[in-house]
Image: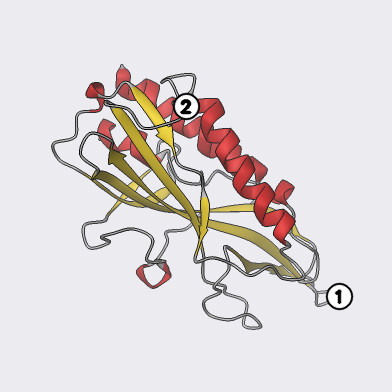
Amino acid sequence: MKRFLLICGFAIATTTLAGCSSKMVSSDEYSGFLPDYSKLVEGESPSGAPTMHWIDPALDLNQYTSIYLERSQFYPRPKPTARVSQDTLDRITRYYDQALKREMSKSLPVVDTPLAGSIIVKPAITAVSASDKDLAVYEVIPIALVAAAVSSASGIRDQNVTLATEAMLIDANNNKVIAEVVRKGEGKVLENDSQPITADDVKLVIDHLAEDLHNSYLTLKK
């Protein structure tokens, strides 16, 4: 049980924000980023959020002395839209990288290049399904919208910004994948389906991710 706590922290944290709740990423939402989805099993993160994950049964985290964070990416590669600009996409990945580095540096040295004894973390923000009937069943963009409520007065739908992530951990000594995780999280509630999405709408989700990662590492070390 303790072993997967660290691994699950590498994904977008699904804490309760503005009344939003998290859900499991279904298999038809897998992006193709991870090399093998067949070994994933259901589990929970330290904060109780549902995950799909796999961990090498022989994994010994105590052998690692540093961490190398690959730059986060969107997968599949998105096209900017009127609601999700290229500037927003760039700001989200930059913030994701900063948050991971900020928290992980409290526990392990974060190195600029993989070294012997490094864990390589390779994260991606991936597409998720949309439940609003006005949206495609599967949006090939990293941020999809899920209807949260319908206003009886105006008929305008409130919408949640929903992020999904997939990440793999790699042993720098042999380039072997030692863990995989898939997870989903929800950010701020938007007023309607035309309100632009900004990086600020997901910063709290990313912050909780990084904090969850650090706390998981400390729990495992104990």
Q: Amino acid at mark 1?
A: Ser
Q: Is residue 10 left or right of residue 43?
A: right
Q: Callout 1: helix, strand or loop?
A: loop
What's the residue at 59%, 34% (across, down)? Answer: 98
Residue 119 picture location, percent across and down: 33, 33
Q: Is residue 157 left or right of residue 120?
A: right
What's the residue at 32%, 29% (across, down)? Answer: 118
Residue 23 picture location, percent across and down: 47, 58
Relative to 39, say whether 156 is above or below: below
Q: Is residue 134 left or right of residue 114?
A: right
Residue receiving disc 2: 104
What's the residue at 86%, 74% (across, down)? Answer: 153
Q: Callout 2: helix, strand or loop?
A: helix
Q: Quadrant of the C terminus?
A: top left
What's the residue at 26%, 56% (across, down)? Answer: 40
Relative to 210, say whether 50 is above or below: below
CA separation in Å, label 2 and label 1: 45 Å
Please indicate, yes or no, whether residue 164 appears anywhere in the rendered image: yes
Residue 58 picture location, percent across and down: 13, 36
Residue receiving disc 1: 154
Q: Amino acid at mark 2?
A: Met
Residue 219 found in image quarter? top left
